[in-house]
């Protein structure tokens, strides 16, 4: 959304990343029945029954809030210990009134999303039909070596790696056979090796829109270093010529980034669905937005990043949307949360 500032009303939760929760800069005082405009002086409008948040947003940050580096460090230190970001944290930070145009905090978060590049050489290519579809850590190979009927390790200088590459056994010729074989591997490895198994499949391709070689359990995607795609949407309303944005807070029960702040709607891209259709589905499930409204969402860009942590090589591509909502609309989750 191309706005320098906007208002965010909180109290709703859904999925995905933690950029927003770490970018908080300035907040107004607590209230249970209003949401606020964030440039000063603060204007309060009593038009909803959710607890308010106020952000400073940069026009190039998609939905990540910009903060000064000192504010970012304070929030990071408070959330890194318990992986949670509470409303009390929000209002404590609200006392920091030093509005700044310094973008160093925002760029810090971009850097943290692309961490671990110094360990890139610890990974070898995962190759299917002469196409690199992922990257597997040398240490994770120890787990995969137990499944000799599924994987083959090829030594030597190949596909840009001096340490060899890994592929599937030639007997696994069809996407269906590969999907079944990999599914059995994930089940055998279990939660101890791959936590957060969701029984949700992601398509494995060399790039978006290309041939699907097989489908893989969502939780296993970063362990095989495959590209994962998702949709993220900013939902906003206009009142008296000002823009106000809805924001979510993730459940404390989530496997990833529990308790942190998030977009109004976000979700991974399962196999066999387009970004636009997936957004309509996620809007209904996560915010109760009917298709008559969600189909008006405007695509505004794509955000990608590579995050390496341990055996995980997370390569995400996010299709970003903006949606203007009716002024009286209140988000309401329609499905039980999947941890």
Image (tube, rainbow, N blue to C red):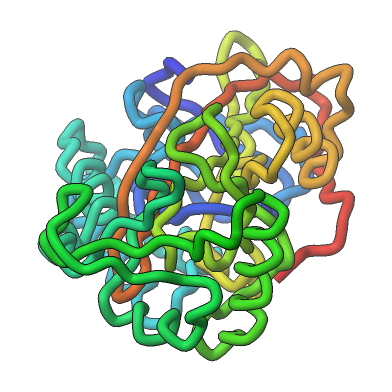
Query: Closer to the camera, 251 or 318?
Result: 318
The C terminus lies in quadrant: bottom right
Asked if one can make out residue 333 in the rendered structure from this viewpoint, the answer is yes
Query: Closer to the camera, 51 or 231?
Result: 231
Res 119 → quadrant = bottom left
In percent of width and height, residue 151 lies at: 46, 71
Residue 219 lies, with reference to residue 35, above or below; the image says below
**Most extreme residue toward the front, as rendered?**
171
| Left or right position of 327 against 72 | right
Q: What residue lies at 37% left-to-right and 68% top-to-bottom?
A: 312
| Left or right position of 18 against 204 | left
In percent of width and height, residue 326 lies at: 79, 20
Q: What residue lies at 73% left-to-right and 36% top-to-bottom?
A: 272
| Left or right position of 219 against 225 | right
Query: Closer to the camera, 304 or 150?
Result: 150
Res 8 → quadrant = top right
Query: Closer to the camera, 138 or 321?
Result: 138
Res 288 → quadrant = top right
How many labels sit on residues? 0
Asked if one can make out residue 52 in the rendered structure from this viewpoint, the answer is no
In percent of width and height, residue 277 lies at: 76, 27
| Left or right position of 40 against 52 | left
**Most extreme residue toward the top, as rendered?**
241
Q: What residue lies at 54% left-to-right and 90% top-to-bottom?
A: 192
Q: What residue lies at 35% left-to-right and 46% top-to-bottom?
A: 132
In percent of width and height, residue 286 lies at: 77, 46
Residue 189 lies, with reference to residue 151, above or below; the image says below
């Amino acid at each position: 959304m191309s706005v320098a500032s906007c208002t965010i009303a909180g109290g709703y939760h859904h999925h995905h990343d933690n950029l927003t929760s770490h970018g908080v800069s300035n907040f107004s005082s607590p209230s249970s029945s209003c949401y606020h405009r964030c440039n000063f002086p603060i204007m309060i409008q009593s038009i909803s029954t959710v607890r308010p948040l106020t952000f400073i947003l940069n026009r190039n940050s998609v939905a990540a809030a910009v903060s000064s580096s000192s504010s970012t460090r304070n929030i990071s230190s408070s959330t890194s210990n318990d992986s949670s970001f509470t409303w009390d944290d929000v209002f404590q930070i609200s006392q920091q009134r030093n509005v700044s145009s310094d973008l160093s905090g925002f760029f810090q978060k971009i850097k943290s999303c692309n961490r671990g590049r110094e360990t890139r050489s610890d990974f070898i290519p995962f190759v299917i039909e002469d196409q690199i579809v992922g990257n597997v850590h040398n240490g994770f190979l120890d787990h995969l070596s137990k499944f000799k009927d599924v994987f083959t390790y090829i030594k030597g200088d190949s596909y840009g790696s001096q340490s060899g590459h890994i592929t599937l056994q030639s007997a696994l010729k069809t996407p269906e056979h590969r999907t079944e074989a990999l599914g059995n591997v994930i089940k055998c490895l279990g939660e101890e090796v791959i936590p957060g198994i969701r029984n949700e499949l992601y398509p494995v391709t060399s790039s978006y829109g290309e041939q699907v070689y097989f489908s893989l359990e969502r939780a296993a995607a970063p362990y095989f270093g495959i590209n994962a795609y998702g949709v993220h949407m900013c939902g906003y309303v206009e009142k008296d010529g000002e823009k106000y944005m809805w924001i979510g807070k993730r459940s404390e029960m989530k496997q990833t980034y529990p308790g942190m702040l998030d977009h109004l709607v976000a979700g991974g891209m399962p196999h066999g669905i387009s970004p636009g259709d997936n957004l309509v589905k996620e809007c209904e499930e996560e915010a109760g937005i009917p298709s008559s409204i969600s189909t008006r969402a405007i695509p505004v860009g794509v955000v990608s990043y590579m995050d390496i942590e341990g055996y995980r090589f997370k390569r995400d591509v996010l299709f970003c949307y903006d949606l203007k909502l009716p002024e009286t609309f209140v988000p309401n989750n329609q499905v039980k949360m999947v941890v």
